């Protein structure tokens, strides 16, 4: 069996099929470097940016089937989940549950007309309009007034001290316990520190 030299790590490898059907270059990238490229691209860009062939100057995009064929089972499962979350997040009436340990989500078809969303998984109530835990004893209008009032510095200070925005999608993240490794609903992972 003939060994080829990887153009990225310079290690020898056995030939594999083309990275994508659109690639016009010889296969000169080993499976480990392809896997590393897919992992790095997902971590740095997520699934909303095109996943391209790692060969310099090759602009071919990897398809879903290419990723399935080239990635490890674990990495492909993560990729598939991130794709699903990306599609769900774009649904205008979809909301994630605000309970810290729930992670469920649902569509709320009545929208702003009936803003209380009750999670079907855990029963936690949240506000559809503001996408926050339900503001008990306040209408959405009253909640808006509180948010816009300059005198409510204690609340703002709390949010500034206890939440950070996701670097990718700007959603507010509150760390309640555990390690500093955070994973946003959009799938982006970052360090709290």
Image (tube, rainbow, N blue to C red):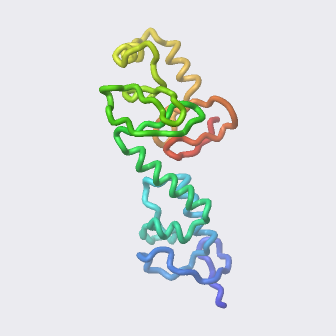
Residue 116 place in picture, x, y as percent: 40, 25
Residue shown at the point (47%, 62%) measured from the top left:
51
Q: Residue furthest left?
A: 113
Q: Is residue 55 above or below residue 44?
A: below
Judging depth in this view, the residue of 39 and 63 nearest the camera is 63
Residue shown at the point (53%, 57%) measured from the top left:
79
Q: Is residue 53 above or below residue 122?
A: below
Q: Which quarter of the picture shows residue 102?
A: top right
Decide if residue 164 is in sight here. Answer: no
Residue 161 place in picture, x, y as percent: 58, 23
Decide if residue 122 is in sight here. Answer: yes
Q: Quadrant of the N terminus?
A: bottom right
Q: Which quarter of the picture shows residue 10?
A: bottom right
Q: Is residue 175 above or below residue 12?
A: above
Q: Residue furthest top?
A: 151
Q: Which quarter of the picture shows residue 103?
A: top right
Q: Is residue 13 left or right of residue 65?
A: right
Residue shown at the point (49%, 44%) measured from the top left:
186
Residue 143 place in picture, x, y as percent: 40, 16
Q: Is residue 193 left or right of residue 105?
A: right
Q: Quadrant of the C terminus?
A: top right
Judging depth in this view, the residue of 117 and 14 nearest the camera is 117
Residue 132 place in picture, x, y as percent: 46, 27
């Amino acid at each position: 069996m003939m060994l080829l030299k990887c153009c990225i790590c310079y290690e020898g490898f056995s030939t594999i099929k083309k990275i994508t059907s659109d690639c016009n270059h010889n296969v000169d990238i080993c499976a480990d470097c392809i896997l590393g490229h897919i992992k790095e691209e997902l971590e740095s860009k997520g699934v909303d940016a095109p996943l391209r062939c790692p060969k310099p100057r090759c602009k071919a995009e990897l398809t879903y089937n290419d990723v399935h064929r080239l990635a490890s089972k674990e990495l492909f499962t993560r990729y598939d989940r991130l794709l699903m979350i990306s599609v769900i997040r774009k649904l205008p009436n979809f909301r994630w549950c605000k309970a810290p340990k729930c992670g469920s989500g649902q569509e709320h078809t009545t929208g702003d007309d009936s803003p209380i969303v009750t999670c079907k998984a855990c029963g936690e109530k949240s506000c559809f309009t503001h996408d926050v835990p339900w503001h008990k004893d306040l209408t959405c209008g009253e909640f808006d007034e509180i948010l816009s009032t300059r005198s409510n510095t204690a609340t703002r200070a709390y949010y500034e001290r206890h939440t950070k925005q996701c670097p990718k999608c700007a959603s507010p993240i509150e760390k309640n316990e555990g390690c500093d490794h955070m994973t946003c609903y959009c799938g982006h992972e970052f360090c709290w520190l």
